[in-house]
Amino acid sequence: MTLPTENSSEPLSPAAHFEIGLYSFAELTPDPRTGQKISPAQRLHNLLAEIELADQVGLDVFAIGEHHRPDFVSSAPAVILAAAAARTRSIRLSSAVTVLSSDDPVRVFQDFATLDLLSQGRAEIMAGRGSFIESFPLFGYDLRDYNALFVEKLELLLKIRASEKVSWSGKHRPSLDNLGIYPRPLQNPLPIWIAVGGTPESVIRAANLGLPLALAIIGGMPEQFTQLVALYRSVARQAGHDLAAMPVSINSHGFIADDARQAREEAFPVFQQTMNKIGRERGWPPFTRQQFDASCLLRGANFIGSPDEVIEKILFQHELFQHQRFLLQLSVGTMPHDKVLHAIELLGTRVAPAVRKEIAGRTA
């Protein structure tokens, strides 16, 4: 497939508020420095405190990933987000991602419509196929249907969003014959983003459907992804969609501390432990300090450094993508809770105001 060569940074909406937020998979792994692992109950308690602080310091979004593994406690993101809704006032609450291929679109819509009502209109769904496969055998699905499941279930989810009464038939789920789906959300329509990891076909699907795009950049150089954003906007324009209503989010790994050296020294053992564990499962070579340090540079994938470095990097990528949202995963493994809270504070009080001010000036 030939990707478009047009610049992905064409002007979009004028002076829109640039959103900055966080996402978490609620890791439950041993601290690499101490070998100690907290209880699932404590991890969820800490996670809710992190979401509450993110709301207090003015961040825009907090998203929770869905995983069905012993090293995460986020198999039911909507439940966690509902608890967070009662403790927050303005932050948007999203999945990151809902593994739609192995879930029931009716139940997904009901869960997030309920969350939307509880949060007074702050719920979102970030739908994707997922980076792990445990949910497929767990819920009785065949991995050979990996792509077909997502396409069919996304079609049903969008049909439910569009209409209270639904008639639908497909291959992988029982048919619906003029059945009502309740409750209906406060937002109309309930926001649904498509999360992609770099597959052009997934980008094209989101563009043709007119859905916002969440692009994960967790490796390589950001310039490698500009053609995907250009492809998304080109296909969306050809399909007759309003680009101003189709924001792009860049989602990346990172960690923030008061100075760059501190951030890197604190983050490296955590990143190395997590990447090596996943690498053993997928046949990757060991994650080295050289790779880590390269990823922290301006043109690397990870946002690990001082507030000023993270500001510079977000603004650098905004020149490339002209995106409307940035989400940071804090962190990819188990970091001491107090350090995560401090990183959230730095993101909300130092990074976000500077980034928003600069981008507002660029797009005015």
Image (cartoon, grey):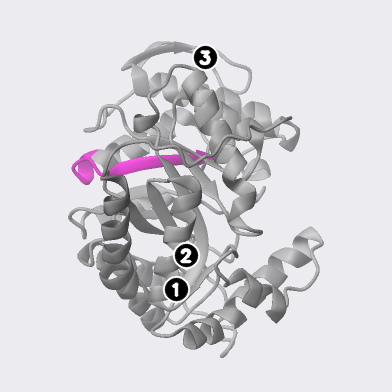
Is residue 71 magenta-colored?
no
* Residues under numbered marks 2 and 1 in contact, where contact means CB atoms less than 8 Å apart: yes
Q: CA distance from mark 2 to mark 1?
A: 6 Å
Amino acid type at mark 1: Glu
Q: CA distance from mark 3 to mark 2?
A: 48 Å
Q: CA distance from mark 3 to mark 1?
A: 52 Å
Amino acid type at mark 3: Ser
Secondary structure of the residue carrying tag 3 is loop
Q: Quadrant of residue 257?
A: bottom left
| Position of residue 156 in the picture relative to residue 270 (left or right) | left
**Residue 131 in sight:** no
Seen at 57% across and 54% down, the residue is 217
Range of residues picked out in magenta: 117-130
Which tag, 3 or 1, sits closer to the chain's start? 3
Residue 195 at x, y = what percent?
52, 42
- 53 or 46, nearer to the observer: 53
Residue for badge 3: 175
